[in-house]
Image: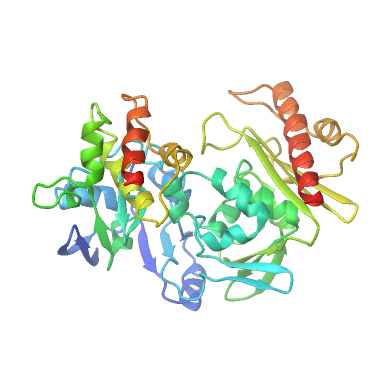
Amino acid sequence: MIPIELTVNGRRYVETVEPRLLLSDFLRHGLGLTGTHVGCEHGVCGACTVRLDGVAVRSCLLLAAQADGAEVLTVEGLAQDGELTALQEAFRRHHALQCGFCTPGILMAADDLLSRGAPPSRDEIVDLLSGQLCRCTGYTPIVDAIAEVART
Amino acid sequence: MKPAPLEYVRAETVEHALAALAGDEETKVLAGGQSLVPALNMRLVRPAVLVDVNRVHGLDDVVPDNGVLRIGALVRQADRRLLSHPLLAEALPHVGHFVTRNRGTVAGSIVHADSAAELPLCLTLLGGAVVALSTRSKREIPADELFVAPYTTVLQPDELVVETRWPTAKDGWGYAFSEFVQRRGDYALCMAGAATGDGELRVAVGSVTARPTLLEVDPEHPGESAAAQVEPWGNVHASPAYLKHLVRVLVDEAVARARERTAA
């Protein structure tokens, strides 16, 4: 077992984990943060995307032990005191989700893209979504929602 | 879809990592993990010991040095410093996805040696190399000796690649990369790279060969002569004849674009 200390959504955790435990399973089963979804477990679907020290990563492709000392942000950490972020509001307004399975991963990936200074172009948003599978919406409302936030 | 039990070693220095790799047990180096961890999850690989090098200092530099861009083993594919090389700038957006490029490393993609991966093709086209260390040796391995077969290189289990070396763009030369994929970010069905200048034309193809391969092509008919030199096996998505067609089209496209850039 490996001792780890990390911050998740602003809260400090001190835990011990099995070396092979994936970060996605640690978040879901260890911390009960089930907003991070698990789809393919090989990096293709993007449902498990979280931000690790600010950078969007696949939590199914990281060991929990690797997050020692890191700051992790999951979808539960976006809204503060019940106030949705601008991106979450835009998703709601544009009906950018239906079943919602892919939504947490897309929000976390887009959150990273939108935090990089220059606002992303529509092409860059479409490129981002190549790594985030959605089977309900046809993507257009998702692109619209992210593009709207990029403009503001 | 969970890794088999394993021991985890977090290396703090290169020496620490090399010592861990020199043991008797089966080890794997964990860098970005964007290819290794899927393989662990699917239990295609079951190393006894995983040597995590992500915290090793001094492996994240990108340094132009005497005509060579030296890229440290922990430099991620999303690193904007890589865009200073015109071939990498064109090929990198095709490597995986925004989120996987955030984590995946340049060196990791090279040593993983997927025959359908973009970066091994680029290293081969440029005539680059890797620097590999172990407790018993240090050697520089040129790209055309490194890649043996799909997922297979000449690296020994106790060796750690600490740097990849990319000849920088030469004055007046043009570079281009082309590929065909079914979905953005997938592995390519076929890909081609071209570099041209000073009366020289270099062409490399990948995905349709067991390893990225430099071809001597007829400068008048590059695509046709490239297609005549490869014997793709075909796969569930594409017949051998179709893949040969792609070689012709993509080589012609890459060569034409590289030539345009020479003029500019």
Q: Is residue B182 left or right of residue B171?
A: left
Q: Position of residue A14 (x, y in %)?
A: 16, 66
Front-lying residue, B254 or A133: B254
The percent coordinates of residue B158 (x first, y second) are 56, 66
The residue under the point 49% across, 55% down is: B78
Q: Is residue A5 above or below residue A94?
A: below
Picture coordinates of residue B253 (x, y %)? 74, 36
Question: Closer to the camera, A21 or A55?
Answer: A55
Dividing the picture into quarters, in which one does residue A88 lie?
top left
Residue B175 visible in image: yes
Residue nearest the viewer, comparing A146 with A35 = A146
Question: Which residue extends farthest front?
Answer: A152
Looking at the image, which residue is at 73% across and 50% down?
B175
Q: Measuring 65% from the left and 71% from the top, which residue is drawn there?
A: B64
Relative image position of residue A42 (x, y in whole percent): 40, 41
Q: Can you say whether A85 is above or below A134 in the image?
A: below
Residue at 74% in and 21% down:
B241
Based on the displayed image, in which of its 4 quarters is residue B137 positioned? bottom right
